Amino acid sequence: MNSSNNSDRFLTIGEAARTWRVSPDSLRAWTRKGVLHPEVTPGGQHRFRERELIAVLGNPNAPASAGSTGTRGAGQTRAPISLEHEPRASSRRRPRASLETEFPEVDEARAELEVARAWRETSMLRREAKLESQEESALAEAERIRGENVRRYEELKAYGRSLAVQLPIEWRQRVITMLERFVKAENVPASLPEDEARVLVAAQVQEIKQRYEDERSRESHEAMGRLRVQGLINEGLATARLMTTSWDPRDAEEARAEVEHDLARSVRPDWAETDVARRVKHTLEQWEEVEDGDDLDEEDDSDESSWDEEEQTEW
């Protein structure tokens, strides 16, 4: 059944169905109606002649016909059909009748083929339209979700800012910066309930508020310590003035300056008044010792000068 002519080759029922885009059941039905005349192999398999399929069903590679009454396109001619299966009344050939009159099954088969092609095209268009509709719906849904998330995050930021209204402006700015950095999908997912999301935001704001309170407490403690130290220094200076009342004014002034300098270096906020009084007394005692030593040195120098003068006089 092999032939050197490609247009006269034989096809299996599956090959024919795929080539002409019809179902095998349609080919079998057209065979039973006598529209197609396949060869039967010794094994009982049907083999369809490609030339006959082109004559009956048309060229599968040609564009679909766009007509009304027939299935032929404009300018197309129907290929002749082999009459080897027709009974011959005599050896004289009779004039061939029109194909539509002589083989109505051919027109029916071609009409069914056109209907099948149109149905496939319609189904494809419907699937494409459905996919486009699904894509548009998916995009619209994604845009709706994105809009809801943006609105939700803005509301959470506003909530966080409302928790920081009592803070100074520079600390409120810290809260705003934190909210812009924290309130995002990776920290507050869309699946998180609203009350839990607010708890997260409140916890972040509370951390900043706690740092503010700690800093304010430290500054207040430092200020109180400075006031405490200054008060102790003033009390120590008062004690020094009282203890140097009977001193020579010049010596008293110098001693009080020494006490003030020493207290400024030594006094701490945890000192008591007695600690300051001891420190003042100790400083004044040291100052007196140094002053007495200076006086003795001056007397020795004076004695030596007198002795030198006497010695020079004797000479």
Image (cartoon, rainbow, N blue to C red):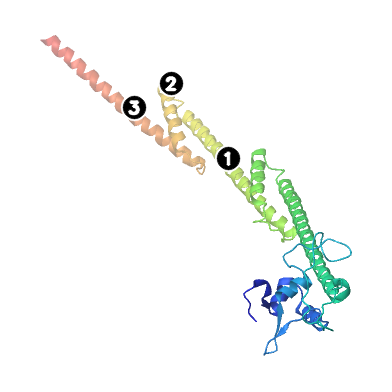
The label on residue 291 is: 3
Amino acid type of the residue tagged 3 in the rendering:
Glu
The label on residue 224 is: 1
Q: Residue at x 17, y 15 (%)?
A: 308
User: Which quadrant does the N terminus fall into?
Assistant: bottom right
Report which quarter residue 44 is drawn in. bottom right
Report which quarter residue 51 is drawn in. bottom right
Q: Nearer the viewer, mark 1 or mark 3?
A: 1
Amino acid type of the residue tagged 1 in the rendering:
Met
Looking at the picture, does residue 97 appear above or below residue 200?
Answer: below
- Residue 214: percent from left, percent from top: 60, 47
Disc 2 or 3, which lies upstream in sequence?
Answer: 2
- Residue 61: percent from left, percent from top: 72, 65
114, 73: nearer the viewer: 73
Q: Residue furthest front?
A: 92
- The residue beneath circle 2 is 249
Check contact, mark 2 vs mark 1: CB within 8 A: no
User: Which quadrant does the C terminus fall into?
Assistant: top left
